[in-house]
Image: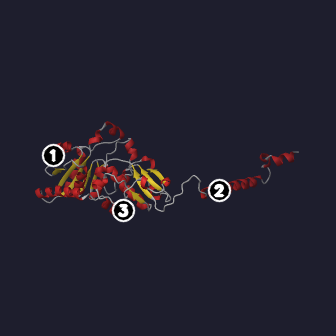
């Protein structure tokens, strides 16, 4: 009777001399079965999954913002497309087309064939100014609609010449900026031009301050100016642009080696800054792009954003500021 009970009770049967081998065999069989099941289900298309029929894959961007934000998202869009051998699409009504001779194919998600194969892609952790390495290896069986800001030089570092060509100002804007600088040269000796972008305006809003935004103090600008005057033996002209022209003139109007942008058209102000040899930044993506396109020596305000703020989480300074730019407090 005891032998019969052992035969049908596995919990007691494992006490036999070869019980451990029986259990190992059982576990191995179960593992093999699970693996085969996974392989079979992975290899077999889900009947509910869309079948993508076109060979070309597209990537576009869904979002908004002002000039600097749009430039980041567009440059990153093109960089991600190139890295994944996809076709970039930029909305035909993008404000950037009014500023630059943008060559990216017009279109948005509604112009992508096989709509069912489009996947939304949001930057990792919603960190607007950090690099998402996963964008290097997108699924080549899908098209993508990027969502976020993608503000990192790393997205387009490998195609810098193409980005410089992408953001060539339209002839009328370039001509106005050229005339501005020509007028400067007519009344000054040959000098090195350093563009300064001062962002204040909305950065002083209470909600922005709570979020982590700050404005660069006067002491920072004075220190940065001294850096260039020492570097070029005083033969420097500072070209000052910003969204608060009254503050700029009240603060720097006494400087004999300073001129001020018109401040009426953002596109013209950026074109003027880009035609300078070097740059000083306060905060904001508008100034960032002015400096990147000028492609000279760049000094930026390093006490940004406010520590322990939401904005600080959003930003990885090593991924946001190019490594050869110079931080200064």
Residue density around tag 2, few if under 14, some if 14–19, many if 20 or more, within 10 Å: few
Q: Secondary structure at mark 1?
A: loop
Q: How many marks?
A: 3
Q: Which residue is mark 3?
A: 159
Q: Position of residue 205 (x, y in %)?
A: 30, 38
Q: Nearer the viewer, residue 266 or 228?
A: 266
Residue at the right extreme, as displayed: 1
Residue visible at 31% across and 60% down in the picture: 164
The residue lying toward the viewer, choosing from 119 and 250, is 119
Considering only order in the chain, which callout, 3 or 1, is on the residue closer to the N terminus?
3
How far is mark 2 from mark 1, CA to CA? 74 Å
Can residue 68 be seen in this snapshot?
Answer: yes
For label 3, count other residues whose C-alpha is less than 10 Å away and answer few (under 14), some (14-19) or many (20+). Answer: some
Quadrant in which the N terminus is drawn: top right
Dot 2 or dot 1: first in sequence order is 2
The residue under label 1 is 253
Q: Is there a contact, CB below 8 Å, between mark 2 and mark 1?
A: no
Q: Secondary structure at mark 2?
A: helix
Q: Earlier in the sequence, mark 3 or mark 2?
A: 2
- Which residue is located at x 42 percent, y 55 percent? 111
Residue 26 position by quadrant: bottom right
Q: Secondary structure at mark 3?
A: helix
- The mark found on residue 226 in the picture is none
Name the spot of residue 243 as percent of width and height, x first: 24, 45
The percent position of residue 247, horizontal first and vertical second, equals 20, 42
Q: Are marks 1 and 3 in contact (CB under 8 Å)?
A: no
């Amino acid at each position: 009777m005891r032998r019969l009970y052992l035969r049908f009770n596995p919990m007691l049967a494992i006490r036999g001399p070869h019980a451990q081998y029986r259990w190992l065999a059982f576990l191995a069989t179960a593992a093999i079965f699970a693996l085969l099941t996974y392989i079979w289900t992975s290899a077999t298309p889900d009947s509910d999954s869309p079948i993508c029929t076109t060979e070309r894959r597209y990537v576009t961007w869904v979002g908004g913002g002002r000039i600097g934000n749009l430039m980041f998202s567009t440059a990153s869009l093109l960089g991600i497309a190139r890295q994944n051998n996809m076709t970039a699409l930029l909305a035909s009504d993008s404000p950037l087309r009014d500023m630059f001779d943008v060559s990216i194919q017009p279109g948005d998600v509604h112009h992508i064939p096989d709509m069912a194969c489009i996947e939304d892609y949001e930057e990792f952790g919603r960190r607007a100014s950090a690099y998402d390495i996963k964008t290097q290896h997108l699924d080549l069986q899908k098209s993508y609609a990027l969502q976020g800001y993608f503000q990192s030089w790393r997205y387009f570092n490998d195609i810098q010449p193409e980005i410089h060509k992408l953001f060539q100002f339209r002839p009328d804007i370039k001509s106005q900026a050229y005339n501005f600088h020509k007028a400067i040269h007519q009344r000054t000796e040959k000098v090195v031009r350093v563009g300064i972008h001062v962002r204040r305006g909305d950065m002083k809003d209470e909600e922005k301050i709570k979020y982590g935004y700050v404005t660069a103090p006067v002491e920072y600008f004075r220190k940065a100016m001294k850096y260039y005057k020492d570097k070029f033996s005083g033969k420097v002209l500072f070209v000052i642009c910003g969204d608060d022209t009254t503050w700029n003139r009240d603060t720097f109007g006494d400087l004999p080696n300073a001129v001020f942008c018109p401040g009426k058209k953002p596109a013209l102000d950026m074109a003027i800054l880009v035609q300078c040899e070097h740059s000083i930044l306060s905060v904001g993506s508008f100034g960032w792009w002015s400096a990147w396109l000028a492609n000279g020596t760049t000094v930026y305000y390093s006490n940004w954003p406010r520590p322990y703020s939401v904005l600080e989480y959003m930003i990885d300074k090593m991924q946001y500021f190019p490594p050869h730019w110079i931080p200064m407090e």
